[in-house]
Amino acid sequence: MRTGFSIRTKLLMVALLLLLIPWMSYEYVREMKTYLLSGQEQALSLTSRAVATVLHDRPELFSEDTPVDPNNLSEDEIYAAPLPNYINLNGDLSDWGEQVNQAITFTKPENGEADLSNLIEVKYALGYRGNYIYTMFQVTDDSVLFRPREFLRVDMGDHIRLTLQDPGQAPKRYTMVAHEPGRMSIYLMDDAWQYPVTGEPNYDLAAEVDVTDTGYNVELRIPRFVLSSDTRVRMAVADVDNPESRELAALVPTTPQSETDELSKLLVQSPRITKILKGLDRDETRIWVFNTDKRVRTVVGNLITEASDGELDKPSNETGVAYLWEMLRYYYNSALQTIFAYIIEQPSGDFADHERSIEERNDEIIQKALNGAVSSDRRPSLDNQSTILMSAHPIYLADGILGAVVVEQSTNQVLLQQKDTLENVISVTLLVLITVATALLVFASRLTLRIRRLRNATETAIDRDGRIISPRLDAEAKSGDEIGDLSRSVSNMLGRLSQYTNYLRGLPDTLAHEVSNPLNVVNSSLHNLSEEIPGSADSKYMERAKNGLNRIGSILRNLTEAANLEQAMQSETREVVDLIELIESYVDGYSFSNPDQKFKVIIHSRPILVEIAPDYIAQALDKLVDNAIDFAAADTAIVFKVRRLDNFAQIDIINQGSQLPEGMAERIFEPLVSLGRKDAQKISLGMGLYIVKLIASFHGGDVIARNLLSSDGVIFSLSLPLHDPYTATV
């Protein structure tokens, strides 16, 4: 009768203590995150409505034909106007349209001289079309000099200089120079603008030069992927007039230069809308303004924020109890941060999203705004490292739609608040979790120890050959839970199995006793029949009957031999013998009785002392040699190898011939398992090798069979423990 709690109940009671605290914390933080995201979406909706209100009924802000007043641009800003046509890079400025007339003129005396008759004039225009930024230079120069081919320096002729710099990066200097009219070579230059850094031209940029009556024209094409939203730009035209000295005569900048020598910021979208929304430019929020064609008119703000490194300050080099306390707190917090990095969603401060330089977007929320609907949405960033909240509002023109405003924010702020809350909850409950986990660990260790004890007792109750050693288990038999119930159940099973095994052991003797009486009756009846009926003794049927009786008698003897042998060996006295002498004597005797079979003995060392019952070892060798003779190939020798292996003496009996079928090497020593023999008249019940197994186990050894690897044949290895004189003395 089981009186204690079940293991399932005990584990459930302990596990519930661990589940309650994290479940409650998770539910609380999840609800808080949902509430904060809802509030953030409402704030974005109000922002988009406010921006749209400022832009209502102002169609001039969305017209690409509206001229740009250079006076409204900052000193470090340049504007790329939309181009009406795609630009063919050939030096012909006809496809620039009205942009040629709106080009800005820059002049500078050569060599800085005051002589106005020796001027270089540059007309410059900047525009965009598709995925490219185009620049036009119309240079008036009375002396156009190209770079000679034999010169290594790049600045030995008239050329264009371009400088690009991303925030926090070193500037990249490009020179566009040509040996003749046509396609210009573009090189990444050193700081002195004299020699290329690598010597290989840059193929991302493209430029074409064409000579005119008054000088030359240059068209430059820059892919927009080269320019990020914060890339700074500077351009200049370098003039060389002296064909002998090749010195720089003049350098005409075509982009604004501030007093701090900072490069200019390139504006691709509408600068007028940008000026209006500049006051809303702040981190963590980005505002897009689109026209009815979903083309970007302006972008202000930035979604990317600098994430805190989260590093802890190490304690100062103090001494005493205060220092030890600070060290403990430092390592405790460090361990907590390591845990938080795995179980809490970390906001990504650096993720990839739409660049400001894109021309248009096709988000569904933009189309809804252009249809007059106010809506909000969520989308992943381009690299799936963050979630972006979006709110869109239409921009009205009387009863129509002029464009749309989209305000975006990442969920980083909400995730940061969620992260801080979870860290606080986990920090407070960590001590409780450690206490409960320790209790669970102690309980699990004790449970494991009990199960292992029961497993060991079960394994030792039955030997390797399946014989019952102990019909009862004492381990955990008095326990009141399922482990005790299992121990008692296994004990009952072992008891029933032991009774059945004893029945099987006595079955051969019982069978021999029951069959011998009818067998004697049949045998005597055949004898009397041959006496009463003259001539019947010579009948073939009489001969068959006698052969059958002999076969039945042989079967009974084989069945009883194994059972009687196991009982007889228990009282057998062992003696210490030299195994080498025993094998040599045995082989001599067997060679005399089997003159047609060859035998060979290989001895590795002598003497080899073993403590055995010689008669039973000889009986085992008889079974192995009979088996080898039955399956040996003609004119081949049966080889005996005797050697030491660690603490055992090993006898290998090798015969050439057929090999064991697959899987038979493990089963051949089981009772009633046999293979076909060459002599079909011999009776084989598969008990011979089983008897060999019994004799080897009685002596504390073993016997195995395996196929030869080098040739066809089988090797049987009988191992016996070496005699230990110290153990024998004790």
Image (spheres, rainbow, N blue to C red):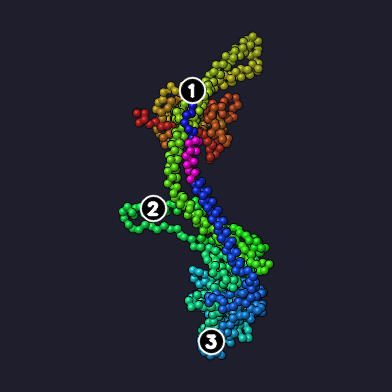
Mark 1, secondary structure of its residue: helix
- Residues at discs 3 and 2 in contact (Cβ within 8 Å): no
Residue sitting nearer the eye, 484 or 594: 484
Task: Establish if 411 lies above or below 153.
Answer: above
Q: Is residue 612 above or below residue 180?
A: above
Which circle's residue, 3 or 2, is located before the other in the chain? 3
Tell me the CA gap for discs 1 and 2.
Answer: 76 Å
* Residue behind mark 2: 329
Q: Mark 3 or 2, which is nearer the eye?
A: 2
Q: Crowding near pointer 3: few (<14 within 10 Å), some, many (20+)?
A: some
The residue drawn where x is 54% and y is 61% is 351
Magenta stretch: includes residue 241: no
Identify the mark at residue 565; answer none if there is no mark: 1
Q: How far apart are marks 3 and 2 (CA)?
A: 71 Å
Instruction: Give the x, y percent position of residue 720.
Output: 44, 31
Q: Is mark 3 on a helix, strand or loop?
A: strand
Q: Position of residue 215 (x, y in %)?
A: 60, 84
- Quadrant placement of the C terminus: top left
Q: Which amino acid does label 3 sit on?
A: Pro
Considering the numbered disc 2 on the image, is that residue within a helix, a strand or a loop?
Answer: helix
Which residue type does callout 1 highlight?
Leu
Residues 226 and 576: in front is 226
Q: Work out whether mark 3 precedes mark 1 in sequence or the reverse, and give the earlier one.
A: 3
In the rendered structure, find residue 461 and report the number of the disc placed on it: none
Rendered image: mark on residue 109 = 3
Q: Which residue is drawn at 50% across and 54% down?
A: 418
Which residues, given as a range, are shown in magenta? 8-21
Q: Residue at x 43, y 25 (%)?
A: 613
